[in-house]
Amino acid sequence: MTFIKVCGLRDHGSVDLAVRLGVDAVGFVFAESVRRIAVEDAASLIRHVTGHTVAVGVFKGSPVPEVIEVAAVAGLGTVQVHDLTSAEDVDRLRDAGLAVIRAVVAGDSSGDFGADRLLVDGATAGAGVPWDWAGQRRPDGEWILAGGLNPGNVRAAVDATGAWGVDVSSGVESSRGVKDAALIEQFVSAVRSGA
């Protein structure tokens, strides 16, 4: 079954819904974004993440020691980092007990640096803009497709790319930064329709 991550959550209702729907991961953004969440608020929400759903902290522009510190305070076991530059960075995160998702933009051929998973986004990471999924070279291993996914296109995107997982944020929002329960449900249903 396709791995599903719903990202940019900032309220109890969205977290509880995602967990109830059985998504595989929920994301909390600590990078500059309209979806950014304070560490203390994230920690409160992460306590509601139960079952097999995993809480993921999303970072960009933070040095590795800061990522480790925020993860510890928030209670995270997994981090998604958008600007890892070496296998040594991944090793430092893993040595701190964290599972690592290395996020890259489409066309980046530098690999996963030994991370647990690779996330491939459009040319502008986090912009929520669809891109040429079918024309992308398929990474090896467990990789997650991101960038402009929504309930109307996610099934076709998975079928075109063979992605192991999908990541959605703006595609399940009623307005910028505000998650919509019906769209989250539709997205999960669309992904699972081909399972």
Image (cartoon, rainbow, N blue to C red):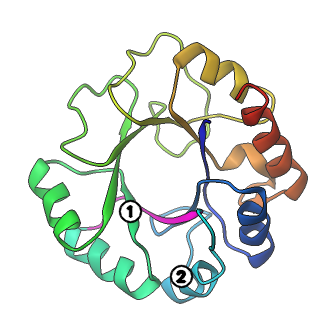
Crowding around mark 1 (Cα neighbors within 10 Å: few <14, some 14 to 19, many 20+) is many
For the N terminus, which image quadrant? top right
Residue at the disc numbered 1: 79
Q: Is residue 176 left or right of residue 125?
A: right
Q: Is residue 62 above or below residue 88?
A: below
| Residue at left offset 21%, top offset 74% | 96
Q: Nearer the viewer, mark 2 or mark 1?
A: 1
Q: Amino acid under label 1?
A: Val
**Of the image marks 2 and 1, the number of the one nearer the N terminus:** 2
- Up the image or down, 161 lies above or below 33; here it is above
Where is residue 188 shown, x and y percent of the image?
76, 43
The amino acid beneath tag 2 is Ala
Which element type, helix, strand or loop, lies under badge 2? loop
Highlighted magenta segment, given as a residue range: 53-62
Above or below 87: residue 133: above
Residue 104, given in percent of the width and then of the height, sits at 35, 38
Marks 2 and 1 in Cβ contact (< 8 Å): no
Residue at image mark 2: 38
Query: Relative to residue 98, is residue 110 drawn left or right?
Result: left
Q: Residue at x 79, y 65 (%)?
A: 17
Q: Secondary structure at mark 1?
A: strand
**Viewport quadrant of the C terminus:** top right
* Picture layout, residue 96 above or below residue 69: above
Residue located at (19% from left, 56% from top): 90
Percent x, y of residue 166: 58, 38
Q: Can residue 95 be seen from the camera position used here? A: yes
136 on left or right of 169: left
x 30%, y 82%: residue: 69
